[in-house]
Every structure is written in structure tokens, then in C-alpha cells.
């Protein structure tokens, strides 16, 4: 029997068309036809593409399953748990509305529903494969197990075939029932599954709805509840048994004394707690128990007569009939004999000698006379039914037949003389195969009707864990009836799966804390939930004491760290050869150096900086030392270093750094010394005040001079070349600062008519004005008189300037004449 997962295809990447394409008509050596080389790669590519698409489609369908085994993230799990809760709530809503929210009666049904969503919990016991959401299934009405529809159809067909082949003389004519593979409940031949139905049997081929229970139609179940109460199931179409009836009915108590009360239909029996008072079967006492269904036997003791009534004794009321062990002795109806039976009830049996009796010669005698043997030959038919008794007339049964006859053995192969009462069995062993079609009969002198095989089947079941315990049989063995507990790592959560599925079933999710002992030096692990596989690496701080200090390791625990293994000297022959050691190994790494900062001063005590504990000690800060040298003038310029004394000993290699006299820009030519520096004899090159000439002055003279002397030393003693605001040159000798604005240059001033002329200093010429006198006025009058007479003699120009020019020229000419 092939499982369902093998029925869709026989290989990866190869379709039936591809397998059929190997053989073509005329495939002989002479009739082979070669396809063109250009078309062959395209056909092969198209063939592979189609097969890959078919494989991808099968993969997608296999993932849409109620028992999907893919790894889920925490967010996906929470989302699926919420969706699962919504589906269960919608299925149970109509029931919980009747019970006021009480779901105690839904425990068993809820377990079946949970198995539909639990990975690996739903398995077809025939093929030991998961039952997917999209596969057609059949559910047993007795044990409610789910099987693949093709698997159960083949199972029913094979079961009927095997029974018919063994029991029917007219093979295949009788209708035999077939059993469920799990609970062995028998189904009539008309109940062979031939259609894919939902759980309640209303809808054929129910569609796969992600918001409904797998293989459910989504409508109300409406199956008749058991035990029969007249009500129907209120749940939506569901697997497993229907829950107890949630309806409320009015029923009386068990004894019928109290008034009827409303009770749950599935729990109608109730007690009024009153005394029963019913008359017990002993007909002497009444029941003293509280309200109940059936009264128990009377527990009291009373005087009871035996069956024959001769004796009386105290006996339990629950067993009133007893025998006194005395012979009855009551006269029989014949009047000649007494009853020989022990104490009994009823009428005594008839006299055993009153029946018709005959002697061996068949003469009738009364019961009072003793029958004596007649002495003739018995001649009664012996047990062999072939011979008669040769003894004289006797009482009792005849002996066995001892005549020698030729007998044929049971199998009909041999004949032999032997006593008639003995059966002749030859030593030939039957070579036929028994009904199991596996073992030979091997029974001595078998007549041909070989008995059923009495050996154990012993074949390995589909679970691969057990062997078939049944008597040797034909056909497939029944599925393994065992269940296996798949536990989480801590063992608190258990998932019961059929035997054989424990290898492919993932451990159930557990909400208990992980109980695995720590694998590092910590006393306990970090709190986390139970999980399959090894625990995650410890993330707690190491806190082991470090070597050389009093601190502890602050790093995460490193007792077991995955480290790439170093394979030294191992040369692999090629990529096909696998390394002998794993790529990563777990090792305990040493604690890192202590990094706790310790405040430490540098060599020169310039600063206090934090230094890692493992490098604790004084250090160089990189700054100049700064300690005074023996010269008393400088400090040590070396990088910060260790010195035991406050003063650094040694010769000062620096130049003199004493302050120079004010104004001296030259350094001391001597090396560092304690006495005063010598006078500076270098020449200072500088320009004069007017910035034209370059002067050289001895630095010692310049720095020692006062301000007035410094001004003289900086003067070139030439006339200042600067020009005053009036336009004349400065008359002073080279001087600092701005030139004085009192120009002493002689300038000439005239009156308006330009007849009077005066010489004044330039600085006062701006305040002085030369006015015309009387003589100047007389001249002006004469000029104006002459102008009027000369107007007709001159050519006037329109331009006023030319007119005045001509007038003045004329006047000047007249003036010179005068």
C-alpha cells in the first residue's frame, strides 16, 4: 500500500510525459528517428520547466496544512494563536450561549480541535503521514480518527477481499463488513467511503476555508446526541464526539418524591437527599439510603429457611436461598423409592427405574426388579459403526473396537493394517502453504484442509518500532495501536502522537521555565521558557575574579564559545572531501584583561587620568616636564619623565632667557648664566622719521637714551620732504609725527584791481585782504569812461568771457598809455 505522499508523482523533475518520451514507435535499431539538434534542447527545457512548475505547485499545497512543521517566529505564533482562538470561539459560541459560558463539557471535543492545529498531532494511521488541510479525509464514527480518503478506500477493499478469499466458497459473492483500522468497529459494505464529506455529513467536498475548522462545512452539526435525549448538537461542524447536551429540562429526583427542577439535559439525575423507603427484595426491610436510582441488596441478617424447608439459620437478606446439604428423602411417585437428590426446591424428579427398561433381550421389567444379563452375545453397534460387540450381554458401554482392518491414512497416501479404533496418521508433512501465504502447513498427514496459520505475524509495522502481534495473516497489518508521548525538554508538556510519528514531530511548545542545568560556572541559567535543543549561550556577566587584582570579569559568560577550529596540516584532496573536524567548536575563553579605570598620576604629576587596571602604573602624559633646572632660569623641556628629586640636575643647554632691556630685540649671546647680561653692541637698522634715509644706531645707545635723544637719533637732519596743506614744502628738519600747519613761506597779495601788491607769510595770508584805495577807484572811473567811447570801435563777441577779455585788454592798453 502506497502512502498518499507517493501517489502524486514518482520523481523530482521528471514527468510522465518525459518517461513516456523515452520510447517511441519504431524504436528498433533500424527504425529510430533522430530529432533535429536545434529542437531537442528546447523540448528538454520546456519539459524541465513544466516539471519544476508541477513540483513547485505540490510544494505550495503541502505547506497549506493543518499540521505544518515550519519554524514560526514569536510574532507569527501569537498571530496564529489569536486566529486559532477566534476559530474555536466561533465553533463553540452556540454551545456556550446555552451553558452561560461554561465550557467544561467541551474538553474532549476541544482536544480533537486542538489536534487539527497542532503540528504532527493529526496522522493517518494507514500511511503514517500527516493529514493536510487540502487533502480529502474520512472520519470514523466510533473513534473519530481521520484517515486519507484513498487510504481508507484501499483499506476497506483489501479487508473485504481477504475475508472473502478465506471464508467464501463462492468467492466474492457474499457481502462482508470491513473494520476501522484503529478501533476495529465494523462497517457494512454499503458504508464504504466513496465521497469526501464534512464531519456532519451535510456537504460534499467542503472547501478549505482558513477561518473554519479544517474539513468543516461551517454549519451547525445537528447530529443526534448520545445518550439519546431528543436534542441535537449545537456546535458548528466539528471533528470528534459531540459534547453533552446543554439544554435545560425539568426532571424529578431519582426517587420521585421531590418536585421537578430545571436541570441540564446531560446531567438530569439528581438527589433530593431524602430517605428512599422502598421495600427491598427480602420483603422484610425498607431501603435506608438517600435518594438514588436502584436500591442495593439488603445488608441486614435474618432467619432464613433452606430450600427444602427442613432447617433454618441466620443468613444475609441479600441471599435468601441456601441448601442444607441433606438428602431430600421424599417418596417418589412410584411409591417404591425415595428422592436421592440433596436439598432442592420444586417437585422431585421421577423415579429413574420407572422408565421403560429391557434386558439385553429387550424384555420389559418393572422398576422393582433387577435386570440380569441374559448371557447371549451383545451384538450392539460399536463406536466405529462398522462392527458389533462380541462380548456377552453386559451392563454399561461396550469396549472399543479392536479388530484388525486395513486403514488409509488421513492424507490418502498410505495404507496399513491396524486396530479399528485407532486412527492411522502417516509421517508425511503437508507441503501446502497456509492461508497466510507465507508459511507451509507442515502438519503430519494433512487431509488438505490446512488449519489457519498459528504463528505470529512478526512483520514490522508502519511505525518502524514494533512488530505485528497478530496471528500470521494476509494483506497489510493493522496500524500500530500504540501511542507515543512527545515531550518538551522539561517534560511538563506532552503531545500524544501515533507510534512512528515521534521522529518527525517537533516537541510541543511549553510555557514552563527551562529546567536544564547550567553548562557554565553560574549556579543558575537566565530565566527563559522551555525549548527544544540546547540552551542559548549564557549571557550573564562572568563575575569571576581576575588575576592580579580584586575586580571581577564584567564580560558576558565565555565558558562555552563557538570558535572556528584551526585545522593545521590537514590537506583536503578536493571540495568533495569533508573535513574531519567541525568548522566550529565550543571552547572556554580566558577572561580579558581588567579594564576598570584606576586614577593614576603621570611621572611629572601634571595630571591624574584613569588607567586600565591591567596597565596600572605611572605613565608619561606627553607634556613638557616643567621642573626647574640647576641654572635657576629654565625648566626641563623633556617629555614627562620619572624624577626622584624636585630639581632636575644637569647642565642647562638652553640659551639665556633673562629679560632684555626695554627696546632691545636681540638675545643674549651667552648661554644660560646667573649674572647680568653684557650690554648689547649690535647695530639697529632703522629708517628716519621721513622714511627716506636708513640709519644705523648702536642698540646699547638707543635703548639707554631718553625720548628726546631717541628722536634726534632717528632724524636724518635733512629738510622734511612732506608737503603742507597749502602746497608748500615743510621747512623743518626731519622730525617725527605730523608737520606743523603754520607755513612761513612769503606770498604776494593784490587788491581787486591788481594795482596794490603786498608780501605776507602763507599762514596769515588767508586772514588778510588787500583793498583798493582812492587811486584805484579813480582809475576804474576813467576806464569805464573810455569803455563807453570805444564800444563802436570794437567787435563785440556774444560770449561774455570774450567781451570782458577785450575790455580788459583795451583798458590795459590805455592804462599803459597813461
Image: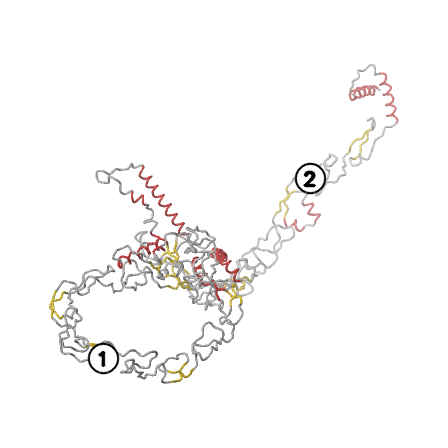
Secondary element under disc 2, as helix, strand or loop, is loop
Observer-nearest residue: 239 or 590? Answer: 239
Give whichever of 401, 8 is nearer the camera: 401
Q: Percent x, y for residue 777?
A: 87, 25
Q: Are marks 2 and 1 in contact (CB under 8 Å)?
A: no
Residue shown at 20%/60% (left/top)?
A: 432
As drawn, 701 above or below 43? below
Mark sitting on residue 366: 1
State the image coordinates of residue 138 (x, y, percent, origin top left). Answer: 39, 55
| Residue that appears at 33% across and 82% down | 343
Looking at the rendered structure, the secondary structure element under dot 1 is loop
Disc 2 or disc 1, which is closer to the eye?
1
Screen quadrant of the N terminus: bottom left
Residue beneath label 2, please? 718
Q: Is residue 269 left or right of residue 176?
A: right
Q: Nearer the viewer, residue 521 or 175?
A: 175
Task: Please indicate whether residue 731 sits to the left or right of residue 35 in the image.
Answer: right
Q: Relative to 276, is 467 above or below?
A: above
Label 2: few (<14), some or many (≥20) within 10 Å?
A: some
Residue 538 in view, yes or no = no
Color style of the picture = secondary structure
In the picture, residue 670 is in which quadrant? Answer: bottom right
Residue 498 seen from this side: yes
Amino acid at each position: 500500500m502506497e502512502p498518499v505522499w507517493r501517489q502524486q508523482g514518482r520523481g523530482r523533475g521528471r514527468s510522465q510525459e518525459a518517461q513516456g518520451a523515452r520510447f517511441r514507435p519504431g524504436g528498433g535499431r533500424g527504425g529510430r528517428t533522430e530529432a533535429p539538434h536545434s529542437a531537442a534542447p528546447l523540448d528538454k527545457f520546456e519539459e524541465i520547466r513544466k516539471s519544476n512548475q508541477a513540483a513547485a505547485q505540490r510544494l505550495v499545497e503541502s505547506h497549506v496544512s493543518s499540521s505544518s512543521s515550519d519554524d514560526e517566529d514569536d510574532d507569527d505564533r501569537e498571530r496564529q494563536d489569536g486566529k486559532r482562538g477566534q476559530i474555536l470561539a466561533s465553533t463553540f459560541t452556540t454551545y456556550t450561549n446555552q451553558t452561560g459560558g461554561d465550557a467544561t463539557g467541551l474538553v474532549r471535543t476541544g482536544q480533537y480541535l486542538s489536534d487539527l492545529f497542532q503540528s504532527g498531532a493529526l496522522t493517518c494511521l494507514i500511511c503514517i503521514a500527516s493529514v493536510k488541510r487540502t487533502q480529502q479525509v474520512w472520519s470514523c464514527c466510533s473513534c473519530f480518527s481521520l484517515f486519507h480518503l484513498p487510504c481508507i478506500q484501499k483499506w476497506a477493499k483489501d479487508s473485504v477481499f481477504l475475508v472473502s478469499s478465506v471464508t467464501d466458497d463462492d468467492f466474492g459473492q457474499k457481502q462482508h463488513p470491513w473494520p476501522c483500522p484503529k478501533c476495529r468497529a465494523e462497517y457494512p459494505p454499503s458504508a464504504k467511503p466513496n465521497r469526501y464529506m464534512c464531519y456532519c455529513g451535510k456537504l460534499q467536498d467542503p472547501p478549505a476555508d482558513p477561518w473554519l475548522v479544517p474539513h468543516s462545512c461551517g454549519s451547525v452539526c445537528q447530529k443526534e446526541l448520545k445518550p439519546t435525549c431528543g436534542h441535537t448538537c449545537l456546535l458548528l461542524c466539528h471533528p470528534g464526539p459531540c459534547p453533552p447536551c446543554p439544554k435545560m429540562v425539568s426532571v424529578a429526583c431519582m426517587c420521585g418524591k421531590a418536585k421537578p427542577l430545571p436541570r441540564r439535559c446531560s446531567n438530569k439525575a439528581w438527589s433530593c437527599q431524602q430517605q428512599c423507603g422502598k421495600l427491598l427484595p427480602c420483603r422484610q426491610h425498607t431501603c435506608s439510603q438517600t435518594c438514588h436510582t436502584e436500591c442495593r441488596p439488603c445488608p441486614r441478617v435474618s432467619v432464613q429457611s433452606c430450600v427444602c424447608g427442613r432447617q433454618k439459620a441466620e443468613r444475609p437478606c441479600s441471599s435468601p436461598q441456601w441448601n442444607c446439604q441433606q438428602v431430600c428423602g421424599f417418596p417418589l411417585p412410584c411409591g417404591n423409592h425415595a428422592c436421592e437428590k440433596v436439598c432442592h426446591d420444586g417437585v422431585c424428579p421421577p423415579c429413574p427405574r420407572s422408565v421403560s427398561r429391557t434386558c439385553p433381550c429387550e424384555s420389559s421389567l418393572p422398576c422393582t426388579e433387577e435386570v440380569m444379563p441374559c448371557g447371549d452375545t451383545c451384538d450392539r453397534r460399536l463406536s466405529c459403526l462398522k462392527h458389533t460387540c462380541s462380548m456377552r450381554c453386559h451392563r454399561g458401554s461396550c469396549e472399543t473396537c479392536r479388530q484388525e482392518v486395513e486403514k488409509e491414512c488421513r492424507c490418502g497416501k498410505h495404507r496399513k493394517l491396524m486396530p479399528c479404533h485407532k486412527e492411522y496418521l502417516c509421517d508425511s508433512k503437508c507441503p501446502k502453504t497456509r492461508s497466510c501465504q507465507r508459511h507451509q502447513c507442515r502438519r503430519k498427514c494433512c487431509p488438505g484442509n490446512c488449519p489457519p496459520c498459528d504463528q505470529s505475524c512478526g512483520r514490522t509495522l508502519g511505525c518502524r518500532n514494533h512488530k505485528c502481534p497478530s496471528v500470521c495473516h494476509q494483506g497489510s497489518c493493522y496500524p500500530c495501536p500504540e501511542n507515543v508521548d512527545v515531550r518538551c525538554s522539561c517534560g511538563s508538556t506532552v503531545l500524544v502522537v501515533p507510534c512512528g510519528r515521534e521522529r518527525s514531530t517537533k516537541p510541543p511548545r511549553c510555557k514552563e521555565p527551562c529546567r536544564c542545568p547550567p553548562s557554565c560556572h553560574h549556579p543558575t541559567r537566565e530565566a527563559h521558557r522551555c525549548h527544544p535543543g540546547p540552551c542559548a549561550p549564557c549571557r550573564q556577566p562572568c563575575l569571576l575574579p581576575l588575576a592580579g587584582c580584586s575586580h571581577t570579569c564584567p564580560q558576558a559568560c565565555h565558558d562555552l564559545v563557538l570558535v572556528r577550529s584551526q585545522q593545521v596540516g590537514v590537506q583536503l584532496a578536493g571540495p568533495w572531501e569533508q573535513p574531519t573536524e567541525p568548522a566550529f567548536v565550543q571552547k572556554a575563553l580566558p577572561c580579558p584583561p581588567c579594564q576598570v579605570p584606576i586614577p593614576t598620576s603621570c611621572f611629572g604629576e601634571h595630571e591624574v587620568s584613569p588607567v586600565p587596571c591591567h596597565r596600572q602604573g605611572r605613565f608619561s602624559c606627553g607634556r613638557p616636564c616643567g621642573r626647574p633646572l640647576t641654572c635657576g632660569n629654565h625648566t626641563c623641556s623633556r617629555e614627562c619623565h620619572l624624577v626622584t628629586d624636585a630639581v632636575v640636575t644637569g647642565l642647562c643647554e638652553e640659551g639665556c632667557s633673562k629679560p632684555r632691556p626695554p627696546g632691545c630685540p636681540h638675545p643674549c649671546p651667552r648661554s644660560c648664566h646667573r649674572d647680568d647680561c653684557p650690554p648689547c653692541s649690535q647695530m639697529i637698522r632703522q629708517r628716519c622719521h621721513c622714511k627716506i634715509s636708513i640709519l644705523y644706531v648702536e642698540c646699547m645707545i638707543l635703548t639707554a637714551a631718553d625720548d628726546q635723544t631717541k628722536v634726534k637719533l632717528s632724524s636724518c637732519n635733512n629738510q622734511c620732504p612732506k608737503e603742507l596743506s597749502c602746497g608748500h614744502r615743510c621747512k623743518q628738519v626731519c622730525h617725527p609725527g605730523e608737520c606743523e600747519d603754520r607755513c612761513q613761506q612769503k606770498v604776494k597779495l593784490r587788491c581787486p584791481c591788481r594795482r596794490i601788491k603786498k608780501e605776507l607769510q602763507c599762514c596769515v595770508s588767508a586772514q588778510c585782504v588787500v583793498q583798493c584805495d582812492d587811486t584805484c577807484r579813480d582809475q576804474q572811473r576813467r576806464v569805464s569812461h573810455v569803455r563807453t567811447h570805444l564800444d563802436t570801435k570794437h567787435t563785440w563777441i556774444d560770449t561774455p568771457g570774450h567781451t570782458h577779455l577785450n575790455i580788459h585788454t583795451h583798458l590795459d592798453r590805455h592804462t599803459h598809455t597813461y
